[in-house]
Amino acid sequence: MILDFYRHLAHLLSTETVVLATIISIKGSVPREVGAKMMVWGNGCTFGTIGGGAGEAKVIQQARTVLATGDKQLVEIDLSGSPQRDTQGVCGGTMQVLVEPWIGDGAIALAHQILTHLEAGQTVTLVTPLEGSQFPYLTATLTRSAFVFTETLQPPPLLLIVGAGHVGEQVAKVAQMIGFQVAVQDDRLEWANRDRYPQASQIFNESIIETLAQLAKHSHLFATLVTRGYQYDLDALQVLLNRELPCKYIGMIGSKKRVKQVYQALEPDIPKQKLASIYAPIGLDIGAQTPEEIAVSIAAELILVRRGGSGKPLAGN
């Protein structure tokens, strides 16, 4: 997850020179996307991945050279399996990786600056010069040039779990594993607390109105309603559907009958197109029964909405 990456980078930079390896261009089929990163330090210690295998091993070796010289490098990785090249993989494509050192107070300051924005749910644009010794910097305007690599760093999505019961507890565990920040809202202190939700970056025991006021500027908010009752669903949906920054996803647990009753109660105040945006009943149909299985069903739907896809089995597609 991007927050873990930059937190780890900021921590290491206080004592180490760190080399960042970033995929800056790809062609054909490759294991990772443009912007994927790995850090290398010490005698080849790593965090993150640019795809593994022989290609990543080559980059780690080049990173050791960069640690010694302090000079950034561009590394070409051939994954085509071409007989004319030293075979580094058979994915079918190629990728170009920028390998550059991060060191000193400027690097530490930049890492913390990036973290501050991402933790607040804000997108930032990072510009990395490809030549010379100029260090990366943040910008408010998009820069396009053959001499720089410009990337938009998106904050990780924040999943607000409304309702801290048994299903919510399992959803928090799975959501953290798939790259979401987790926040929990429930007025019951005995349910919504650090012991039950160690994954949560924020726990709200106030009302849903007060909770969403504190998350008003978060641009990548997902919400799952796994509450203990009909009225709690109504209260949450009234606020979530009227949020100034629309939620990326709103899912509500419950039977089709309960969902229908909630919609009927909201129809006088909420336009039908907004009601149609709700994923309810929540999750993908995988026959889930236990709280753990339901959490997997919900997480699969979160990935589908975030990444795209059909939700159909891959076999036979």
Image: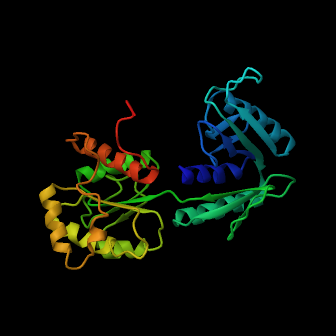
Q: Residue furthest top?
A: 83
In the rendered view, would you say 270 is above or below 172? below
Q: Nearer the viewer, residue 29 or 263?
A: 29
Residue 105 x %, y %: 76, 59
Q: Nearer the viewer, residue 212 or 126?
A: 126
Image point (65%, 38%), residue name: 46
In the rendered view, would you say 31 is above or below 157? above
| Picture quadrant of residue 253 | bottom left
Task: Name the side, left or right, on which 137 lies relative to 167.
Answer: right
Residue 223 x %, y %: 35, 61
| Picture quadrant of residue 116 | bottom right
Image point (21%, 68%), residue name: 232
Q: Nearer the viewer, residue 73 or 20?
A: 73
Residue 43 visible from this viewpoint: no
Residue 259 x %, y %: 18, 61
Task: Name the side, left or right, on which 123 lies relative to 187.
Answer: right
Q: Colour mode?
A: rainbow
Quadrant where the C terminus is found in the figure: top left
Q: Residue furthest bottom?
A: 269
Task: Name the side, left or right, on which 157 lies relative to 311.
Answer: right
In the rendered view, would you say 183 is above or below 82? below
Residue 1 x %, y %: 53, 49
| Picture quadrant of residue 112 | bottom right
